[in-house]
Amino acid sequence: MSTPSASGAKDQVARLLTLVPFLHSHDGVRLDDAAAALGVAPGQLLSDLKVLLMCGLPGGYPDDLIDVDLDALEGPEADGVIRVSNADYLSRPLRLTPTEATAIIVALRALRSGAREETREVVDRALTKLEAAATEGSAARQIDPGEVDLERLDQVRLEADLHDAVARQRQVRLIYFVPSRDEQSERTVDPRGIVSAHGFTYLDAWCHSARAPRLFRLDRIREAAVLDTPVSTAPEPPRDLSEGLFKRAEDTTLVTLRVEPPARWIVEYYPVEAVRPGPGAALDVDLLIADERWLQRLLLRLAPHARVLSPTELDQAFTRRARATLSLYA
């Protein structure tokens, strides 16, 4: 017995996808008439119906499978009429879960990025219907979105757009929320890739405003527009965050701060090496710094609730900076 070829199996699946809706709309059709309408030989259609017997809902139990009356098609008492039962669900409208709808939307957006103009028009129409159905509108009766997490859906779309920008090496204009300044900033970046660490997803990119590589948390990106402008920096792979957001480099300095309760928030806001109980309610915090100026600005924000324990020269440098700053008010 020969094994069916891959192309034969593929052709049969295509025939079954056509056969199922045809039989649902032509109840009690004769085998010869159905074969003529579908453009296949009666013998081939009978073989397909025998395969249809093994199709149905997940589970594989008798009540889950489509029932085809083969006695009416073969044997001395056959009348040649196709009778299909236990397939009422074929008449139900298509229902997509939020995950399924999101996956299709992301796939269509990826397809659109490399498609021709005429294909984009078709994809755009499909996207419009899917996105409307996944949120609200008349199409929601055809696609059941369930409890749609709109914020998550927006982030999935954002991530798909950023992947597209990385693949096509196009610049992206971001409107990014900066928590430390409680403000939004607009900047143009050269995207390098999407990375994850500590439960968050980041865009790794060269920031033209900072003139340095930066990580942008996707949930803080308010808007992102993929530009037609190609990236102006040399393409690089995204950084490896498996060891955390920050790696200790040769030019970093380990600093120990003593922080009082009003300044303890830095432990949650900045990456630290270690935290130990200090005298009273204070904490002794070890952190790595690469720029002494950054540390001085941080200490000015925390004053008088934080000071440097070591290295002592940094504490002396901050004392001079603080006195110079106070002299400006005199």
Image (tube, helix red, strand yellow):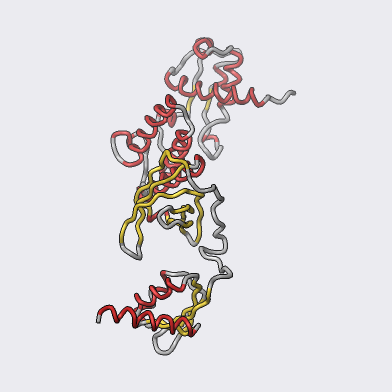
Say which quarter of the image contains residue 278: bottom left
**Residue at far bottom of view:** 279
Depth order, front residue of 191/99: 191
**Residue at far left of view:** 330
Q: Residue at x 55, y 31 (%)?
A: 55
Percent across and percent down for residue 92 are: 40, 31
| Quarter of the C terminus within the rendering | bottom left
Q: Is residue 159 visible?
A: yes
| Quarter of the N terminus within the rendering | top right
Left or right: where 234 falls relative to 123: right
Depth order, front residue of 146/190: 190
Q: Residue at x 57, y 68 (%)?
A: 249
Using the image, determine if residue 35 lies above or below residue 281. Answer: above
Left or right: where 186 falls relative to 197: left
Percent across and percent down for residue 320 are: 39, 82
- Disc count in the image? 0
Depth order, front residue of 99/157: 157
Q: Residue at x 56, y 13 (%)?
A: 40
Left or right: where 242 falls relative to 104: right
Percent across and percent down for residue 261 are: 36, 81
Q: Residue at x 49, y 53 (%)?
A: 204
Left or right: where 297 falls relative to 256: left
Using the image, determine if residue 317 lies above or below residue 48. Answer: below
Q: Is residue 100 visible?
A: no
